[in-house]
Image (cartoon, rainbow, N blue to C red):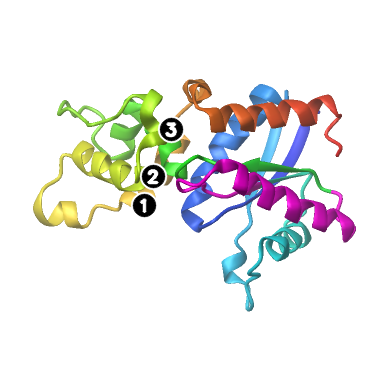
Amino acid sequence: MDEIRYTLISDGSSDRALLPILTWALREKGSVRRVQPEWADLGRLPRPPQSLLERILSAIDLFPCDLLFVHRDAEGEDPKTRYREIRTAAREAIQRGFQVPAICVVPVRMTEAWLLFDEPAIRLAAGNPNGKNPLDIPPLSIIEQIPDPKDLLFQILRDASGLRGRRLKKFKTGECRIRITELISDYSPLRQLNAFQRLENDISALKRNSWLL
């Protein structure tokens, strides 16, 4: 497939950080040349949908696409539970006439765990690319075991910034988090993680089925 449009449904607005990751994975495993990503900003609706099924139906209706990515953080629970939730809602959407393929995106903890591996990108996103102070970046082998990767990432970004006092208080870690994913060009190190392997395998399987359910 030369071109594909996809829409991401996520737990929160900060998970827009997944867009560059998903685009990279599609190009790698889906052999797609041109990718048009879209984040389903459902929170701005007068009556935001609440259930996962309602969110899927609204996203497909308001953000037409060829492929739907549905994100849920496992947050320490068994990831299989999240996969079941997503697949059940996707099947119900199909029964209502929506025929857009859906792929689960389930980091074991939080999205931020997938951003804790590229030190140059972290330093650049923090606005201090030439910083030399040591950063407490854990090895990828234990990333999925960290209880709160968001808190850790934000602390690493603050350390990487080299800022102090009032300037540090004004430092916007949330914006830097989005910036990290835009700066990383190679996400292949994440293939050490089971959740990322599952994501790429699902993309490959969909490709083998000619992008049809």
Q: CA distance from mark 2 to mark 1?
A: 5 Å
Residue placed under numbered mark 1 in the picture:
174
Within the magenta stretch, is there residue 150? no
Q: Residue 75: horizontal and vertical position, in percent?
A: 46, 48
State the mark number for residue 177. 2
Q: Residue at x 41, y 42 (%)?
A: 112
Question: Can residue 145 be seen from the camera position used here?
Answer: yes
Question: Can residue 33 be seen from the camera position used here?
Answer: no
In the image, what residue type sits under mark 3?
Leu
Q: Residue 62: horizontal and vertical position, in percent?
A: 74, 62
Within the magenta stretch, is there residue 91? yes
**Region rendered in magenta:** 70-99
Q: Nearer the viewer, mark 2 or mark 3?
A: 2
Q: Residue 163: horizontal and vertical position, in percent?
A: 15, 45
Q: Residue at x 29, y 42 (%)?
A: 152
Residue placed under numbered mark 3 in the picture:
183
204 vs 144, nearest the viewer: 144
